[in-house]
Image: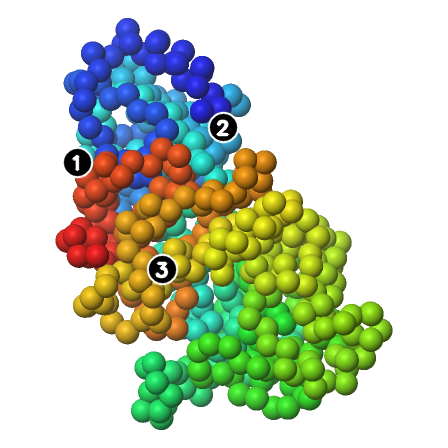
């Protein structure tokens, strides 16, 4: 570890204060980098335990107190104070930014030291897990911990099915408890535009509602429900969710799809299309040929105006522009697109998408942000300032990392948690398809095939939750959990994963899920994968 010598010194100092170390187990998910648990001795945390705040760390203290109030079913949250005994939290610049150290002893009580507010928060999440799974008893010992990846993400599609503000906050709570720090919020697609844009009110007035929803895998009329469906977030609601996430050290990365997956926008504003044909908000899943016209200046003006408001709402340095699955049929027939290609000296339509992506990237950079997109953005050529989200497999991510782009690994066959969890599919309801059990995720190495020099460009790992057949947050949770724990082990503890210990640790972690009231799937715990 980066600060192994520091840990060694701390452990030596603890030897005098702690009983002889033993094999007494403490099951934590994700796996901490270093743990020494004493043979005996413990501190019992109750609703009356005080959180002693040093270095003005009020936010992580208040979040922890609220979580513990819910667990203890107490009338008031745990008291916070600048002095006294109890759970002491403070900062230390020698601890990695998102790392923490936890010392539990008779002399120290419970002391959590973080390299930043986020590090303290993650230390408190570990403490929360121990308290809940160990009946409030925190054994004497020492833990030192830090994440493997800077980007630890999960995605949520709210276009295919819409989730309320409270649902999204609940999703954020689950991510934060697993020490994730990015929520990729998929806000627009063919099936619905979900974010208020004041410059174009038609986007939500018309584009947020579809006539009906596909509820089966076939294309016969019986597979549609015949019921209008929609919803969107006001800008006030967006700000509320962003602030809620920030208090839990989760950065929200918004995605505004372009130039494909835009039929909801085309329904609202037909002039965005090549032939300005009127189309409905799409009621099917998959890929539609209706895409934004890349040959009209009005399209670029629209995209920049939308992104101006998005930038205002989201502090995230990265802004996701989609860029995936864009058929070029309309462009081949479009006089505007062909004229643009001729003017720019482009030989084929793939380069035209590259031109659009390059213009949007330049706009984002000029506004102090950076572009992230699905791996198709590589097809038209991007600069090395773009971050690539590799979903079609590992090859695109490896290629991008080798050429100097930052990469988030999220291959469909390992990271799409809307896929089935068992081979039998029994009890899983109707899903999009695929098969990704817990253990398949856990065995994955995101560095596979990446050269040593390029590994520094693999900045993170993300799991994705597409919602074609997920109508409620309860179903989302059942698809997310416990597989998110397998993903969190990769994101936080990649090089120290232990296939021998994960099942007993998960059996303990299950108590945490139960206490939080989350609707997790039972298959992994039943050995039914």
- Per the image, label 3 sits on a secondary structure element best described as loop
The answer to whether residue 175 of the structure is visible from this angle is yes
190 horizontally vs 349: left or right: left
Q: What residue did someone put label 1 on?
A: 135
- How many numbered markers are drawn? 3
Residue 453 place in picture, x, y as percent = 59, 36
Numbered mark located on residue 96 in the image: 2
- Which residue position holds label 3? 417
Residue 459 showing in the rendered view: no
Q: Nearer the viewer, residue 255 or 234?
A: 255
User: Toward the viewer: 267 or 173?
Assistant: 267
- Mark 3 and mark 1 lie on one chain; the one further toward the N terminus is 1
Badge nearest the viewer, 2 or 3: 3
Image quadrant occupied by the N terminus: top left
> 10 Å neighbourhood of mark 3: few (<14), some, or many (≥20)?
many
Query: Looking at the image, do the residues carrying marks 2 and 3 touch, with CB atoms under 8 Å apart?
Result: no
Task: Determine which quarter of the picture holds residue 436.
Answer: bottom left
Q: Is residue 346 above or below residue 529?
A: below
Q: Earlier in the sequence, mark 2 or mark 3?
A: 2
Which residue corresponds to the image point at 35% horizontal and 41% vertical from the top-left? 489
Quadrant assignment for the C terminus: bottom left
């Amino acid at each position: 570890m980066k600060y192994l010598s520091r840990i060694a010194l701390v452990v030596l100092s603890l030897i005098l204060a702690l009983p002889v170390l033993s094999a007494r187990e403490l099951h934590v998910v994700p796996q901490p980098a270093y743990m020494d648990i004493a043979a005996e001795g413990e501190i019992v945390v109750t609703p009356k335990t005080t959180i002693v705040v040093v270095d003005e760390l009020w936010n992580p203290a208040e979040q922890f107190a609220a979580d513990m109030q819910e667990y203890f079913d107490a009338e008031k949250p745990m008291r916070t104070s600048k002095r006294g005994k109890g759970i002491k939290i403070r900062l230390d610049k020698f601890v990695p930014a998102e790392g923490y150290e936890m010392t539990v002893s008779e002399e120290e009580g419970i002391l959590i030291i973080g390299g930043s507010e986020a590090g303290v928060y993650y230390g408190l999440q570990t403490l929360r897990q121990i308290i809940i799974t160990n009946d409030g008893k925190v054994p004497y010992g020492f833990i030192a911990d830090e994440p493997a990846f800077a980007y630890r993400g999960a995605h949520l599609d709210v276009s295919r099915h819409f989730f309320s503000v409270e649902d999204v906050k609940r999703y954020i709570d689950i991510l934060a408890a697993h020490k994730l720090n990015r929520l990729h919020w998929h806000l627009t697609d063919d099936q619905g535009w979900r974010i208020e844009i004041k410059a174009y009110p038609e986007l939500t007035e018309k584009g947020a509602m579809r006539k009906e929803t596909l509820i089966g895998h076939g294309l016969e009329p019986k597979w549609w429900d015949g019921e209008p469906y929609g919803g969107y977030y006001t800008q006030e609601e967006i700000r509320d969710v962003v602030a809620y996430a920030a208090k839990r050290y989760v950065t929200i990365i918004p995605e505004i799809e372009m130039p494909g997956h835009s039929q909801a926008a085309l329904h609202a504003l037909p002039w965005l299309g090549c032939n300005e044909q009127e189309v409905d908000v799409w009621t099917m899943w998959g890929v539609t040929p209706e895409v934004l016209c890349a040959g009209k200046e009005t399209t670029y003006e629209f995209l920049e105006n939308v992104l101006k408001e998005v930038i205002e709402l989201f502090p995230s340095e990265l802004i996701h522009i989609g860029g995936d699955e864009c058929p070029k049929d309309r462009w081949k027939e479009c006089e505007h697109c062909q004229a643009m290609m001729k003017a720019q000296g482009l030989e084929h339509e793939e380069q035209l998408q590259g031109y659009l992506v390059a213009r949007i990237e330049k706009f984002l950079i000029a506004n102090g942000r950076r572009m992230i997109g699905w791996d198709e953005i590589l097809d038209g050529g991007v600069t090395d300032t773009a971050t690539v989200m590799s979903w079609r497999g590992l090859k695109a991510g490896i290629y991008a990392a080798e050429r100097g782009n930052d990469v988030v690994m999220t291959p469909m066959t390992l990271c799409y948690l809307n896929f089935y969890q068992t081979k039998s599919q029994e009890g899983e309801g109707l899903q999009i398809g695929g098969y990704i059990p817990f253990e398949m995720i856990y065995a994955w190495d995101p560095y596979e095939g990446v050269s040593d020099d390029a590994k520094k460009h693999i900045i993170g790992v993300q799991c994705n939750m597409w919602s074609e057949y997920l109508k409620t947050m309860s179903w989302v949770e059942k698809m997310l959990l416990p597989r998110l724990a397998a993903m969190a082990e990769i994101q936080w503890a990649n090089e120290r994963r232990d296939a021998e210990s994960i099942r007993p640790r998960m059996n303990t972690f299950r108590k945490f899920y139960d206490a939080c009231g989350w609707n997790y799937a039972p298959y992994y715990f039943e050995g039914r994968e």
